[in-house]
Image (cartoon, grey):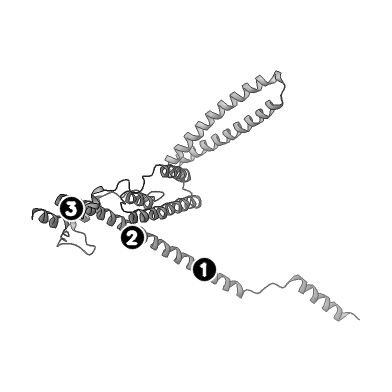
């Protein structure tokens, strides 16, 4: 009886507060929402794959593992599309640089030019070394070593400038590429499917009360995680639907503008072709010839 009472208390639905507004939030919740700082929006939303992997680790039965494998494939595809879309958006909408960021960009450009010059010099000296006589090879090798050392210094300067520009918000493409590299590296260390499965889940048909209680608790926790993942997926789907509707409306608006411009252009008189004018002039001259 005690276990039954505890189970009823823990599985009952939470009571809805009496005082709430139209949005379903109490004054205390509204105060917490207002005071909570807004989280910065990531450049690339990797939550679909992260959520799929987190849930895949809890898959225990073969059916769950098959579904988890499919969810990982879909999540990985969505994240790849998110990286592609983020790079395209960053290329089409470059950020406005502050004076400090502009100086950093100039420093990066100078370091890049110096690095390319060093590489060209090394390649030229290497070609000379291949055809030079023995008396000049030591001197050319020393020049190559000095050029390589200078290239290393210029490479360090270029890397430092790139990092400073990225931190200043002036190079989102480099940051996105770095995130993509980290994402690809994380794929190699991803947890395997079923690695975090609770062994007590399969004891729901046991004959002891303790085993049944453990199985009930494990399944209840798993259900809560699945509901959280489902809510996250629904919110993501809703945002994508809104974005799709906005893009469709913009495309329709552009289509109407092009159609209006085409109709306006059709009203203008068309220019007469030169060949037609020439033929008319010749016919006019023949008419007045004797």
Instruction: Spot the residue most to the front.
Output: 207
Question: Which residue: 35% across, 53% down?
Answer: 65
Name the residue nearer the viewer: 13 or 237.
Answer: 13
**How far apart are the alpha carbons under marks 2 and 3?**
32 Å
Residue 234 disc label = 2
Query: Element type at marker 1?
Result: helix
Q: Quadrant of the N terminus?
A: bottom left
**Going from the N terminus, do you reach mark 1 or mark 2 first?**
2
Q: Residues within 10 Å of mark 2 (few under 14, many from 20)?
A: few
Instruction: Say how many tags the image has.
Output: 3
Q: Residues within 10 Å of mark 3 (few under 14, many from 20)?
A: some
Residue 255 disc label = 1
**Going from the N terminus, do you reach mark 3 or mark 1 first?**
3
Residue 275 disc label = none
Query: Element type at marker 2?
Result: helix
Depth-wise, is mark 3 or mark 1 nearer the camera?
3
**How far apart are the alpha carbons under marks 1 and 2?**
31 Å
Name the residue nearer the viewer: 116 or 253.
Answer: 116
Residue 274, by quadrant, is bottom right
Give above or below for 253 relative to 5.
below
Give above or below for 255 relative to 128.
below
- What percent of the width, then of the height, locates residue 250? 46, 65
Q: Which residue is mark 3?
A: 212
- What percent of the width, then of the height, locates residue 281? 81, 75
Depth-wise, is mark 2 or mark 3 nearer the camera?
3
- Report if residue 263 is visible in the image: yes
- What percent of the width, then of the height, locates residue 139? 66, 20
**Going from the N terminus, do you reach mark 2 or mark 3 first?**
3
1 and 2 marks in contact (CB < 8 Å): no
**How far apart are the alpha carbons under marks 3 and 1?**
63 Å
């Amino acid at each position: 009886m005690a276990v039954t009472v505890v189970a009823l208390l823990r599985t009952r639905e939470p009571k809805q507060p009496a005082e709430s507004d139209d949005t379903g939030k109490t004054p205390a919740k509204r105060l917490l929402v207002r005071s909570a700082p807004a989280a910065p929006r990531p450049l690339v939303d990797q939550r679909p794959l992260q959520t799929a992997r987190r849930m895949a680790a809890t898959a225990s039965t073969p059916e769950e593992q098959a579904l988890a494998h499919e969810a990982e494939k879909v999540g990985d595809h969505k994240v790849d599309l998110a990286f592609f879309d983020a790079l395209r958006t960053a290329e089409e909408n470059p950020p406005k640089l502050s004076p400090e960021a502009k100086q950093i960009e100039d420093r990066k450009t100078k370091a890049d030019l110096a690095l390319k010059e060093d590489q060209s010099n090394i390649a030229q000296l290497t070609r000379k070394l291949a055809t030079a006589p023995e008396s000049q090879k030591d001197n050319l090798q020393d020049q190559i070593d000095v050029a390589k050392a200078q290239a290393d210094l210029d490479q360090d300067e270029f890397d430092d400038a790139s990092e400073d520009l990225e931190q200043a918000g002036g190079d989102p493409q480099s940051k996105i590429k770095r995130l993509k590299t980290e994402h690809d590296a994380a794929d190699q260390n991803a947890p395997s499917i079923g690695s975090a499965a609770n062994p007590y889940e399969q004891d729901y048909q046991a004959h002891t009360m303790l085993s049944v209680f453990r199985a009930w608790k494990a399944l209840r926790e798993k259900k809560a995680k699945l509901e959280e993942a489902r809510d996250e997926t629904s919110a993501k789907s809703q945002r994508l639907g809104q974005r799709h509707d906005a893009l469709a409306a913009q495309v329709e608006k552009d289509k109407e503008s092009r159609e209006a411009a085409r109709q306006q252009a059709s009203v203008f008189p068309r220019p007469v072709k030169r060949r037609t004018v020439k033929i008319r002039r010749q016919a006019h001259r023949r008419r007045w010839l004797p």
